[in-house]
Amino acid sequence: MDAERPSHDVLLDAADIIRSGGIVAMPTETLYGLAADPFSPAAIARLFAVKGRAAERAIALVAADVVQINELVQPLLPLEQRLANAFWPGPLTLLVERPSSIPAELTGGSDRVGVRVPAHEVTRTLCRVSRRVLTATSANLTGEPATADPEVVARVFASSDVDLLLDAGRTPGGPPSTIVEVFRQSVRLIRSGAIDFTEVQACANARL
């Protein structure tokens, strides 16, 4: 699959799989991830089982754009919007309030959920044609390293685990997304990652 001009027909097939409760392996701007329907408790349970992931471990989401996040998750707060304008599409995850439409099982019971708009055309287009935000947990078994190589994904997961692999070649790799949370009028670091937190702080503290 062409990473910059992905086949619309293939992505439509992938969207059908996701809407029917399936799991699709997809590229992102860092590593490969597993996409499932975050609004489906059955899909979430299957995703945790496939990864061997503990129930208390939260899974973050990706979206086609800010509009999709505002409509399907939560409208971004002003400071969150400023960070989104500066770093999206890109590997910055914002922790926002989890809406009741997203089962608590996805976030280990937390009232917060991570969201971002990735800098990868395949991922964003898949969200768009699926008409929903999607999970983006790394495509690996829990405790094993995440991978940028689709051949590794294919070896790790059998066809009974992952219904479709969107092979767009190797991704850039590197660290996962940086996770931050806006608290009052400041921003705090939850997980270090691809974007240096000092850059996030500088954006948050900049005078408009």
Image: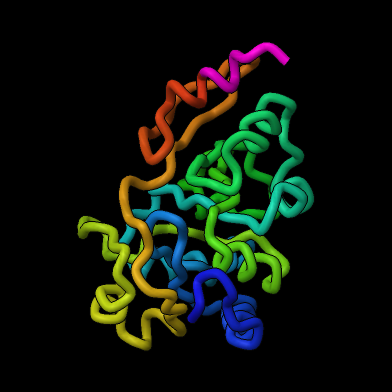
Q: Can you give x and y, in whole percent of width and height, for residue 31 in the image?
A: 37, 59
Q: How many marks?
A: 0
Tell me how the rendering is colored. Answer: rainbow
- Report if residue 41 is visible in the image: no
Is 95 left, or right, of 25 in this rendering? right
Which residue corresponds to the image point at 24% horizontal and 80% vertical from the top-left? 155
Q: Position of residue 192 (x, y in %)?
A: 36, 33
Looking at the image, residue 108 lies above or below residue 184: below
- Give x and y (percent) for residue 18: 58, 76
**In the rendered image of this protein, does residue 95 appear above or below residue 157?**
above
Range of the magenta residues? 202-208
Residue 169 counted in the magenta span: no
- The residue shown at (60%, 80%) is 11
- Say left or right for 185 vs 67: left
Task: Name the residue nearer the viewer: 207 or 192.
Answer: 207
Q: Nearer the viewer, residue 58 or 208?
A: 208
Residue at 62% x, 37% y is: 96
Locate residue 129: give its quadrant. Answer: bottom right
Question: Residue 207 in magenta?
Answer: yes
Q: Residue at x 62, y 14 (%)?
A: 206
Q: Residue furthest left?
A: 144
Q: Is residue 54 above or below residue 162?
A: above
- The quarter of the picture where the C terminus appears is top right
Q: Quadrant of residue 121?
A: bottom right
Is 170 displayed left or right of 207 in the figure? left
Examine the rendering and report whether any part of residue 68 can be seen. Answer: yes
Query: Camera-side residue: 56 or 4?
Result: 4
Residue 148 position in % (x across, y down): 32, 63
